[in-house]
Image: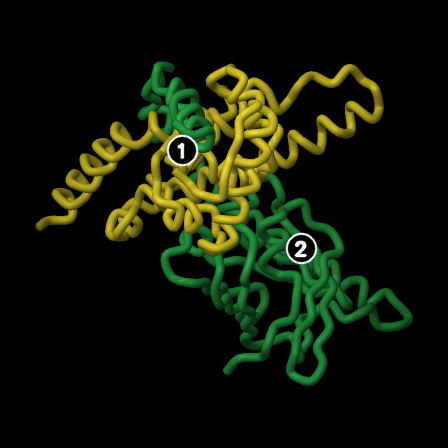
Chain colours: A green, B yellow
Amino acid sequence: MSSPDRLDRLLRTELRRADDFPVESRYHAVLARSAQRTRRRRTGLVATAAILVVTGIGGVLQWQSSPTPPAVDQPHASLSGSWTRTVTEGTVGDGAWTLSFEEAPLLAIEGPPDRPATSVTDGASYAVRGDQVRVNIFVNGACDAAQVGAYRWTVDAGLLYLDVVEDDCEVRQELLIGTWVRGS
Amino acid sequence: MRSRDRADAGAEAFAWFFAAEYPRVVRSLSHLVRREDAEDVAQEAFARLHQHWAKVSRYERPDAWVRRVALNQATSLATREGKRYQRERRADLGARDVAAPVVPDTRVGDALRTLPVRQRMLVVLYYYEDRPLSDAAELVDMTPGAAKVALHRARQALARLLDEETSDELA
């Protein structure tokens, strides 16, 4: 037997020793987590709506008390609409992704078919302040611990450029950072 | 079929799927992260699957869906743990070996955990789960070509560490 064969055989044999370890079924724990996630998501949606309302009121008050208008904190017209980018590497899922900045705070996202990242995205929210946009894409999916990410955006000649300002979620960064082409 | 009957059938199908796949997912993840983390990540992935079961159960391969969710989480966890380990080492805080132990705790396991996370995943999917390389590549979101190169590098590194020779051919 040649050495390469031996290496392959060694890897298979040793890794399969994991089969000897008993794995306790955690079926009920999984069902409990699922129910908890559902409750959390509902709570999160309510909280997001409340934050957006409070932020909106705060913005209005700031506007009224400030001698000069604040920086743009409403969705900029040039950001509105659909943008498409083809992701070619990373864990987010290869293929064409589309972001649609609809009437704030609704951000629709569509990814390649049959990608888990797509499936665990139950819609998202966004908020624009100046040259930064804050998004919570994948908050119910790959970005559990990182609720919101902040990105700097610029639009030029029908292209949207996104760069990260602050985001602990690597999957979201993989998706967003780059050049997006305006869609229909 | 009435909606109540559909719900019962869905719950039963999920239970069967869980019984078949959960242990395999935990064992695979045990090669990538610590055992207790593997169970946690697997539970989270199956909890998400449960939430989306009505849709995912109609996919051709629900097993691929749950693995991809689990692998994504395991990657994030392994990356975070790795960075923390490096920070603690730099600060000389007596860092515990956060990347270890993987299961099984053998010299192969020791060698495996020195690899980058994605190479580790490919090795596990190819050698432990016995998946075709194209299948493994899809699960870690790589092209078949990139996966072949990554697996080749992983084998070379493992061969060095295990004092074995290797070639370009995958057995």
Foreground of the two, A68 or B13: B13
Furthest-right residue in this view: A67
Q: Secondary structure at mark 1?
A: helix
Foreground of the two, B36 or A133: B36
Q: At 57% from the left edge and 59% from the top edge, which residue is drawn? A: A125
Q: Secondary structure at mark 2?
A: helix
Q: At 35% from the left edge and 22% from the top edge, which residue is drawn? A: A26
Residue A122 vertical placement versus A60 (above, below): above
Quote the CA–CA distance across marks 1 and 2: 54 Å
Q: At 54% from the left edge and 75% from the top edge, which residue is drawn? A: A82
Which numbered circle lies on residue B14?
Answer: none
Residue B166 vertical placement versus B59 (above, below): above
User: Mark 2 = which residue?
Assistant: A54
User: Mark 1 = which residue?
Assistant: B127
Q: Is residue B43 visible?
A: no
- Where residue A31 sits: x, y (%)? 34, 31
Dot 2 falls on which chain?
A
Dot 1 falls on which chain?
B
Q: Nearer the viewer, mark 1 or mark 2?
A: 1
Q: Identity of the amino acid at label 2?
A: Val
Q: Is B13 left or right of B78, judged from the image as shown?
A: left
Foreground of the two, B158 or B130: B158
Q: Are marks 1 and 2 in contact (CB under 8 Å)?
A: no
Q: Identity of the amino acid at label 1?
A: Tyr
- Where residue A119 sits: x, y (%)? 40, 53
